[in-house]
Image (tube, rainbow, N blue to C red):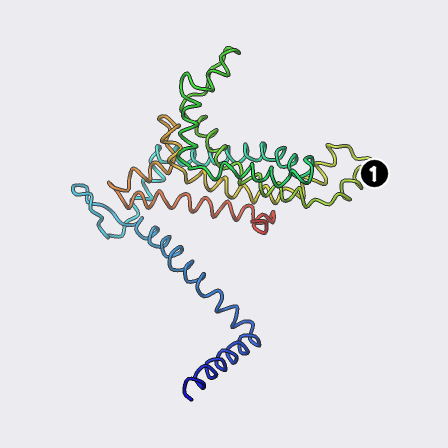
Amino acid sequence: MTTDVTPAAGRGTVRRLAGTLHHRPRLRLTLLLTAPLLWLAVLYLGSLTVLFVSAFWTTNSFTSQVVKVWSTDNFHSLFTTPVFRQVVLRSVGVALAVTVLCAVIAFPVAFCTARVARPRWRPLLVVAILTPLWASYLVKVYAWRLILAEGGLADWMLRPFGLSGPGFGLPATVLTLTYLWLPYMILPVHTALEQLPDNLLDASADLGARAGRTFRSVVLPMVLPSVAAGSVFTFSLSLGDYITVQIVGGKTQLIGNLVYSNIELNLPMAAALGTVPVVVIVLYLLAIRRTGALNNL
């Protein structure tokens, strides 16, 4: 008799719990969000808090051991040392350059895949755009190192015109990062162009608008939030990258390289440097929030 009653009691408890959750949507939503919110608060925000707090510590100049004494020397050095200011400005400039190049390249590619190509070919073109993301990050960067090296593919293609490849340096870094993060810009732009109603384009043409006017007045305002959404990825990924710079950047240094080089010798200084990309990205997100880009992520 006991084996028959226990399952029935268990099913009754499950039914009562399901009924309670059904009639209390706020409780159901709270239970669903508890785990991800705990992960966000403890692992992500907690790690950022530790990063920010440790930036106010110092190190022993002899042993390089961290001394948990409150000091603002790291941030003072960050703002007053010319090298740090140059690297920060260079890093932001590289991230902006990569974002602009990705937007310029992504728009015609996305327009071709979303509006020009036949519908049956569009999924295959999207897969082709995503294919580079399946390859290893290091494999792609080292492939570009071979392309940009002296006597490489870039030199071979430009030699008939009396030119040479960019070699290793800041242009090579921007070019490689643009290739790496381009799919993150193409995809949201492709989605926006694919969802663009045909009747708007037809109405613009019927009203006598030329292609340029249609692009400025109809297409661009509707696609701009998606471009801004893609820029969140291209900007943030470029700002925090340091491996590409080490492989193809030559003597160029970005802020990620300074963080990496200071981890062993001066951890608090590395933490202070690490807060810079976080602050810059937060300011960038606040700047593009008004465009509706965050709704397209």
For residue 159, side relative to residue 292 (left or right): left
In this rendered view, identify the residue nearer to me: 206 or 3.
3
Residue 212 in the image, given as x and y percentages of width and height: 73, 32
**Mark 1 residue element:** helix
How many labels, in total?
A: 1
Question: Residue at 40% across / 43% down in the picture?
Answer: 276
Say what amino acid the circle numbered 1 marks.
Answer: Asp
User: Could you say where residue 6 lies in the image, as x and y percent from the top left?
Assistant: 43, 84
The residue sitting at 50% across, 37% down in the picture is 181
Given residues 204 and 54, the one toward you in this image is 204
- Label 1 neighbourhood size at 10 Å, few (<14), some (14-19), many (20+)? few
Of all residues, the one furthest to the bottom in this rendering is: 1
Could you say which is closer to the camera, residue 50 or residue 36? 36
Q: Which residue is mark 1?
A: 206
Question: What residue is rendered at 45% in x and 21% in y?
Answer: 166
Looking at the rendering, which quadrant does residue 170 occupy? top left
Above-or-below relation of 133 to 165: below
For image coordinates 21% across by 50% down, the residue present is 67
In this view, 169 is above or below 281: above
Left or right position of 29 against 108:
left
Task: Name the residue furthest left.
Answer: 62
In the depicted structure, whether residue 147 falls above or below residue 294: above
Residue 124: % across, % down: 60, 39
In percent of width and height, residue 254 lies at 38, 34
Quadrant occupied by the N terminus: bottom left
